């Protein structure tokens, strides 16, 4: 895996984790009873973005190490998910 691939893998994991973490523990303005004029009652009152970003980063690092280690170890390869045999035989099998 190249450096660019590792960075892309980390960013994909980070954004997926962040989108999962966004709705957790949100208190809406409607629930707090402090709806600001011109906003929707479902708008967040307290969103805790900094805390969610830190937690997301820590979880993403752990997941990135696990997934990256699995990819680098060769336990799972692209050929393992080739269900229709479009990739052909491995180069070592043809010799």
Image: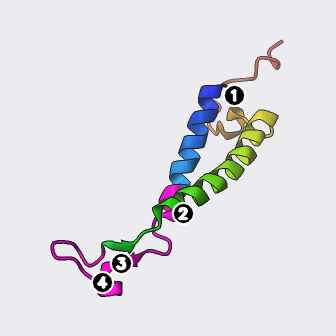
Residue 39 lies, in percent from the top left, at 21, 72
Above or below 92: residue 83: below
Evaluate if marks 4 and 3 touch, with contact meaning CB atoms under 8 Å apart.
Answer: yes
Q: CA distance from mark 4 to mark 3?
A: 5 Å
Q: Closer to the camera: disc 2 or disc 1? A: 2
Say how the picture is coloured.
Answer: rainbow
**Residue 4 occupies quadrant:** top right
Which of marks 1 and 2 precedes in the sequence? 1
Q: Is residue 61 visible?
A: yes
Residue highlighted by disc 4: 30
Circle 4 sits in a helix, a strand or a loop, which is it?
helix
Residue highlighted by disc 2: 51
**Label 4 crowd bin: few (<14), some (14–19), many (20+), radius 10 Å:** some
For residue 1, the mark is 1
Residue situated in front as seen by the camera: 78 or 60: 60
Q: Residue furthest top?
A: 95
Which of marks 1 and 3 precedes in the sequence? 1
**Label 1 crowd bin: few (<14), some (14–19), many (20+), radius 10 Å:** few
Evaluate if marks 3 and 2 touch, with contact meaning CB atoms under 8 Å apart.
Answer: no
Circle 3 sits in a helix, a strand or a loop, which is it?
strand
Residue situated in front as seen by the camera: 88 or 58: 58
Q: CA distance from mark 3 to mark 2?
A: 17 Å
Residue highlighted by disc 3: 28
Residue 45 lies, in percent from the top left, at 36, 75
The boundaries of the magenta stretch are: 18-42
Which of marks 2 and 3 precedes in the sequence? 3
Q: Closer to the camera: disc 3 or disc 1? A: 3
């Amino acid at each position: 895996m190249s450096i660019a691939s590792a960075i892309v893998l980390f960013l994909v994991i980070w954004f997926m984790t962040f989108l999962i973490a966004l709705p957790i523990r949100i208190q809406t303005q409607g629930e707090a009873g402090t709806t600001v004029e011109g906003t929707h009652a479902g708008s967040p009152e307290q969103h805790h973005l900094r805390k969610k970003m830190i937690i997301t980063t820590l979880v993403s690092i752990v997941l990135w190490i696990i997934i990256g280690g699995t990819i680098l170890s060769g336990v799972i390869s692209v050929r393992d998910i080739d269900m229709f045999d479009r990739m052909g035989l491995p180069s070592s099998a043809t010799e």
